Image: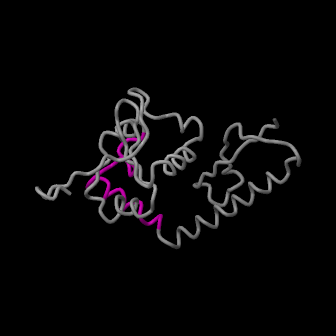
Amino acid sequence: MNQASGTLHPQPLPGPRGFPLIGHVTPFIRHGILGAFDSLAKRYGPCYRLPLPFGNTAVVLAHPDGVERVLRSNRDNYIKGTVYDGARLLLGEGLVTAEGQAWERLRALAQPAFNSAQLATYLRTMTECTEDLLCEWRKLPAGKKYQPVGSRHTADSCHRRPHLVWVGFEWAQQ
């Protein structure tokens, strides 16, 4: 804060430099999506700016307190803005992309699927599906290296809740 005027002069957020058209894609190519966000948070801290393609910038929150503030306790002060325009073209105006009253209406419609009893059911189903997948993996020959070559939906092995989609891996021997 400037003592004389009483005004705030916020420091710019840390973050990587980006390229004008492609933003900062290097860690995403090297580490994948989750690995990139993890490595960037370790380097720049729990709140950093991320250059996106076409000159856009996102603010990334990598701490639960910041996420809670933006998504829950103080959500009316934050907008998704133009960063979501591409997603809106692909996904339409849904829960992920909507804002304001449209978002509130969609959230109210989705809320029953997230009560504690329903979440417990989802958790049991995901646990069963994970156990099924682990059983498949245990059948692979020992002592050989495998790498994921793609994904497949294993809803057939999770027929208990066909509306849930579990993504597994098909493995190819190296």
Extreme-bottom residue of the structure: 117
Magenta stretch containing residue 74, yes or no? no
> Is 72 situated left or right of 163 in this image?
left
Classify residue 52 by image quadrant. Answer: top left
- Position of the N terminus, as image quadrant, is bottom left
Magenta stretch containing residue 99, yes or no? yes
Residue 140 on image: x %, y % = 85, 48
Of 53 and 171, which appears nearest the observer? 53
> Is 166 situated left or right of 110 in this image?
right
Extreme-front residue of the structure: 4
Of 162 and 120, which appears nearest the observer? 120
Q: Residue at (70%, 58%) from the top-left corner?
A: 130
Q: Which residues are magenta?
A: 91-114
Q: Residue at (26%, 58%) from the top-left corner?
A: 76
- Position of the C terminus, as image quadrant, is top right
Residue 29 on image: x %, y % = 57, 35
Extreme-left residue of the structure: 5
Q: How is the image coloured?
A: one colour
Residue 159 on image: x %, y % = 68, 56
> Is 153 situated left or right of 19 in this image?
right
**Main secondary structure of the magenta stretch:** helix
Q: Residue at (78%, 37%) from the top-left corner?
A: 172
Classify residue 86 by image quadrant. Answer: top left
163 versus 15 height, above or below: below
Of 70 and 106, which appears nearest the observer? 70
Classify residue 160 by image quadrant. Answer: bottom right
Number of marks in picture: 0
71 versus 152 height, above or below: below
